[in-house]
Image (cartoon, grey):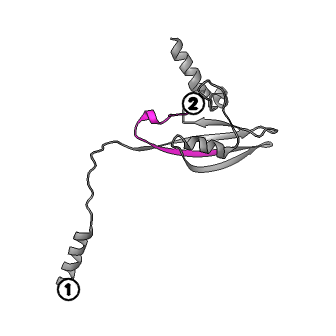
Amino acid sequence: MKKLLLFLVSMGCFFFSHAQEKSSDTTFVKKVFCEIVGRGNFMGTKVDISIDFGQKISFFKQYNQKLMVDEEGKRIKFNSMIDALNYMGKFGWEFEQAYAVSMGNTNVYHFLLSKDITSDREFLYGIKTKAMIEEDVTINRK
């Protein structure tokens, strides 16, 4: 009786289990991260967003060089951190974690974002910083 019950359970597992099929798509997906830092001025309603991808930037220039800019190199002013998150979401970035640090009369908001990419070209898609614009100008002059 035990052997029959064991056989029936084994057969049930066999029939209801699904084998994993090897996908013909051999793309490798990796998760990348960035941090957006929002600073509002004391009297203003807009927020400046700097973005950190882990890029190498001079210590003395790091705040200005990481500011998010449009295609012409003009600083993008966001209405709030949520506005900045929605902007980043358009390019596939997803929220991971947030924290705020008080600096004098101003709160500095740090949001950690992630994105799954299959190639390095996708990493910076749609995002520009002041340093990227200046580097592009330097490359184009040569």
The local crowd at label 1, few if under 14, some if 14 to 19, many if 20 or more residues have their Cα within 10 Å, is: few
- The residue that disc 2 covers is 128
Give percent across and percent down for residue 58: 61, 26
User: Which image quarter: residue 106?
Assistant: top right
Instruction: Report the amino acid beneath label 1.
Output: Lys
Give percent across and percent down for residue 29: 39, 44
Foreground disc of the pair 2, 1: 2
Q: Residue at x 45, y 36 (%)?
A: 122
Point out which mark residue 85 bears: none
Q: Which residues are magenta?
A: 110-127
- The residue that disc 1 covers is 2
Helix or strand or loop: what does disc 2 sit on? loop
The vertical placement of 37 against 135, above or below, is: below
Mark 2 vs mark 1: which is more N-terminal?
1
Q: Is residue 116 within the magenta segment? A: yes
Q: CA distance from mark 2 to mark 1?
A: 68 Å
Give percent across and percent down for residue 54: 54, 35
Give percent across and percent down for residue 20: 27, 57
Q: Residue at x 62, y 30 (%)?
A: 69
The vertical placement of 77 against 25, above or below, is: above
Helix or strand or loop: what does disc 1 sit on? helix
Q: Is residue 16 within the magenta segment? A: no
Relative side of 114 to 51, left or right: left
Q: Residue at x 64, y 30 (%)?
A: 62
The local crowd at label 2, few if under 14, some if 14 to 19, many if 20 or more residues have their Cα within 10 Å, is: many
As drawn, the residue found furthest toward the right would be 43
As drawn, the residue found furthest toward the top would be 142
Q: Residue at x 42, y 43 (%)?
A: 30
User: Which image quarter: residue 15?
Assistant: bottom left
Instruction: Report the amino acid beneath label 2.
Output: Lys
